[in-house]
Amino acid sequence: MKANLIASRYECSRCKKNMRLQKRKGTVDGYEWRCRNQSKDNRHDVVRSVRKGTWFSESKLAITIILRLTRYWFGKSMNEFVMNDLKVNKNMTKLIRYVAAILRSQVGE
């Protein structure tokens, strides 16, 4: 949130109140946005992924890896990081190029 990669708040589509960021086992990132309302007239349980609306919303990578990739991309040491820190092989090049293109388009580079 501090790096503005995910939203700092979301409004519930049902009641228009701010949703709460909650820990959630079984989700890829360990968190989700949630609004639970138990009132008789507007009972609902709305859940939203923390990735929704982000450039990595369709990615299957762990958010920790996505954040590290982003950090190193802006630090201009992406290839070295991917090969050494993440311990991946050269087949990762396509993903790196894809992520780099998305990041460039997001920052207007």
Image (cartoon, rainbow, N blue to C red):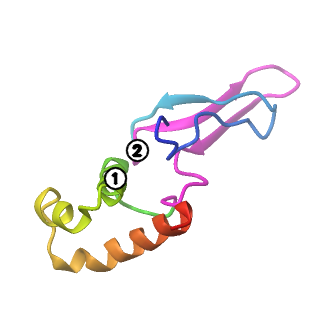
Asked which quadrant contains residue 11, the reply is top right
Where are the magenta residues, as a range? 28-57
Residue 10: x percent and y percent?
67, 37
Residue 107: x percent and y percent?
53, 60
In the image, is 30 to the left or to the right of 94?
right
Q: Earlier in the sequence, mark 1 or mark 2?
A: 2
Give the structural element (helix, strand or loop) at label 2: loop
1 or 59: nearer the eye? 1
9 or 14: nearer the eye? 9
The residue under the point 52% across, 43% down is 4
Residue 79: x percent and y percent?
21, 68
Using the numbered discs, state the Cα–Cα distance from disc 1 to disc 2 in whole angstroms: 7 Å
Residue 87 in the magenta stretch? The answer is no
Asked which quadrant contains residue 15, the reply is top right
- Report the residue marked by disc 1: 62
In the rendered structure, find residue 35 and report the number of the disc placed on it.
none
Disc 1: CA contacts within 10 A as few (<14), some (14-19) or many (>=20):
few
**4 is higher (above) or lower (below) than 42:** below
Asked which quadrant contains residue 7, the reply is top right
Q: Amino acid at mark 2?
A: Asp
Give the structural element (helix, strand or loop) at label 1: loop
Disc 2: CA contacts within 10 A as few (<14), some (14-19) or many (>=20):
some
- Report the residue marked by disc 2: 29
Q: Are marks 1 and 2 in contact (CB under 8 Å)?
A: yes
The residue under the point 24% across, 74% down is 92
**22 is higher (above) or lower (below) than 98:** above
